[in-house]
Amino acid sequence: MLAPVSSGIVIVVVIGYLLGSIPVANLVAGRHGVDDLRDVGDRNPGYWNAAEQLGRRTALPIFVGDVAKGMTAAGVGAWVADGRWWFPVVGTAAAMVGHAWPVFADFRGGRSVLTFVGGAAVISPAAALVATVIAVSVWSVTRRFDWAARVGVFGYPIIQLVVDGPARTAATGVLMTFIGMRFAQASLVSRTPVPSTPDDV
């Protein structure tokens, strides 16, 4: 049984990492006049920075694409899992690592929040649905997408604890710890001045 499990993990990790490595944000931004999001704004190549630079509507494909990366990677894990609940978690983790250190973009990536969100929808659909409803409710009252997103993301593991129990929620905690690490790393990088270039706008 060990060999099939090992080969399954390899498949999930490799596919998840390669999916996560697709630089969706820079591909979209490049089509709208921003060569590299890592050189502008908060230097995060993701939806939030793209929305600031390009506008929310233009950045929407980035939101969808980054969520799809995590969802697809977790879906591959679920397909290979053969009943093992933690395979989608492995797939999501691999995609998050790929998003953070993408092989297709010089290993300089984003914080993996939306990739986590996509994976979370597969890891615990019930918890994801409830968290989404709560997030939409917060947005409808406050009209603040950032607050709605925070409530949804941080509410998810609390809901999952009720729905799935402590073991699966602990796995989600590991993924969220990775996001926290990426935010801490990004805050250190943001203190370094961006080198000026002739192409700066």
Image (cartoon, helix red, strand yellow):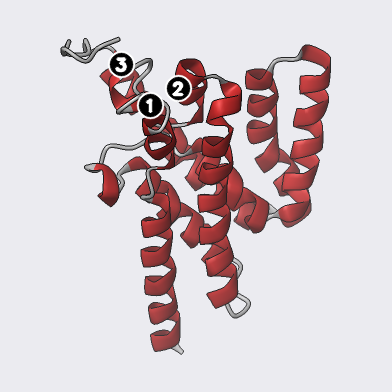
Disc 3 residue type (three-letter): Ser
Q: Quadrant of the C terminus?
A: top left
Q: Is residue 14 left or right of residue 116?
A: left
Foreground mark, 2 or 3, reads 2
Q: Between residues 58 and 63, which one lies in front from this camera angle?
A: 58
Helix, strand or loop at label 3? It is helix
Q: Which mark is residue 190?
A: 3
Q: State the CA–CA distance, disc 2 to disc 3.
A: 13 Å
Structural distance between the alpha carbons of marks 1 and 3: 9 Å
Q: Amino acid at mark 2?
A: Asn
Q: Are marks 2 and 1 in contact (CB under 8 Å)?
A: yes
Q: Nearer the viewer, mark 1 or mark 3?
A: 1
Mark 1 = which residue?
44
* Residue 15, percent from left and from top: 41, 65
Closer to the chain start, of discs 1 and 3, is: 1
Q: Is residue 193 above or below residue 148?
A: above
The amino acid sitting under disc 1 is: Asn
78 up-or-down from 51: above or below: below
Q: Which residue is mark 2?
A: 49
